[in-house]
Image (cartoon, rainbow, N blue to C red):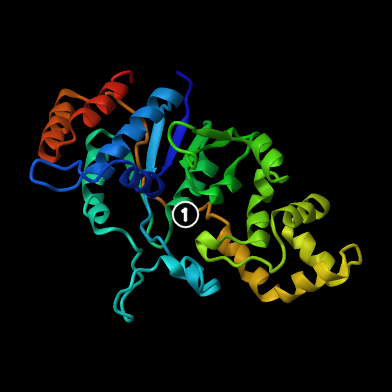
Amino acid sequence: MTSRLMLLDTASLYFRAFYGVPDTVRSPDGVPVNAVRGLLDIITKLVGRYEPTHMVACWDDDWRPQWRVDLVPSYKAHRVAEVVASGPDVEEVPDPLEAQLPIIREALATVGIAVLGAPGYEADDVIGTLATSSTIPVDIVTGDRDLFQLVDDEREVRVVYTAKGMSNLEIVTEATLHERYGVSGGQYADFATLRGDASDGLPGVSGIGDKTAASLLQTHGSLDAVIAEADEGSALRPNLRVKIRSAAEYLAVAPQVVAVARNVPLKEADATLHSLTPAAMNDATELANTWGLGAAMDRLTDALSRY
C-alpha cells in the first residue's frame, strides 16, 4: 500500500454528518448520536476508497482566532452565537451536536485515529502545517474552499472535496483550479482575498468578482503585484485602479486572515493507521454498546482491519 496522509477537516465532516443523518438516531438512553455514527461512516468510506496509510482528524481548538478578528473584525462574526457580551465568542452549534463532540473524540481515539488541534488556531491551520511538512502525498478532506490554497501537484497535495455530498466526492488538483477558477493553488488565497467570501465574513474588494480576480492574477501573478500596479503602474483600467486603491486598508490585512498558517506548533501524534488490537477492539465494542453506535463502529473497525 502506497503511503498517503489523509487530513480530515473534522468540523466540516461532523456538521455534514449531523445534518445528513436523522436525529432520531440515538443511544440506548436517548442521547442523539447521529453525528457520531455519520462521521464514523464517512471515515469508513474514505478509508475504503482512498486507502490512506496515515490519518489525522484536525480539530478547531479555536474556531475564530482573536488574531484573525483583530485584523478583520467581520471574520466569521455572523457565526457567533448570542451569548453574554463580555464572554468569549462561541460558535453557533446546535446543542444536540455540541453534546456529541466528546463522544466523537472518544470514538476516534478508541480506533486509533489521531486528533490534533492547537491553541489559538483553526483546523485549517493544523491542516496547512501538516500538509506543508508532509514527506508523503496528502489528501485533505473538506467542504471548505479555503483549503484549495494548499493544492500542489508537485508535492502531491490534493483536496477531496465533499461539497456535493459523500456520494459525489471530487478530487481537486491544480487542473481543477485552473479549469474552474483560472488560478493555481498558489494563487488561490490571493484570489479569495480579492473576491471575498461571505461565508467567512470577508468582504473582498467591492466590484471584483471571480472573473476579474482571476484575470488580474493571470496577468500580474500575485496580489502584491496587482496592488503595486494599481499604485504605480498604468496597465489597469482606471475603474479597477480606483477599486483596488479604495480597498487598501482591507488588502493590507486580509491576506494574513485568508492564508492558512503553515508553521503551527503541534504536539507529536502517531498518524499511522492500524488494525485494532484485541484490547482496543474490546474498548470499541464497549463504546459502541454504550452509545448505540452499532454497525457504524463495526464497519470502521472492519475497514481498519486491512492495516
Residue 53 position, x and y percent, is 41, 27
**In the image, what residue occupies the spot 70% across and 73% down?**
247
Q: Is residue 63 above or below residue 53?
A: below
Locate residue 303 relative to residue 127 in the image: left or right: left
Asked if residue 221 shows in the view, the reply is no
Q: Quadrant of residue 121?
A: bottom left
Asked if residue 102 shows in the view, the reply is yes
Locate residue 169 relative to residue 178 in the image: left or right: left
From the image, tell me which residue sits under label 1.
264
| Dot 1: element | loop
**In the image, what residue occupies the spot 27% across and 34% down?**
112
Q: Nearer the viewer, residue 55 or 163?
A: 163
Residue 300 position, x and y percent, is 28, 28
Q: Nearer the viewer, residue 115 or 169?
A: 169
Q: Quadrant of residue 248?
A: bottom right
- What residue occupies the far right of the structure in this picture? 234
Q: Is residue 256 above or below residue 123?
A: below
Q: Nearer the viewer, residue 269 or 188?
A: 188
| Amino acid type of the residue tagged 1 in the rendering | Val
**In the image, what residue occupies the spot 26% across and 42% down?**
22
Graded by Cα atoms within 10 Å as few (under 14), some (14 to 19) or many (20 or more), the crowding at tag 1 reads some
Locate residue 100 relative to residue 228 in the image: left or right: left
Pick the quarter of the image with the C terminus.
Answer: top left
Number of marks in picture? 1
Residue 306 position, x and y percent, is 32, 18
- What residue occupies the far bottom of the structure in this picture? 86
**In the image, what residue occupies the spot 50% across and 35% down?**
139
Pick the quarter of the image with the N terminus.
Answer: top left
Q: Nearer the viewer, residue 283 or 291?
A: 291
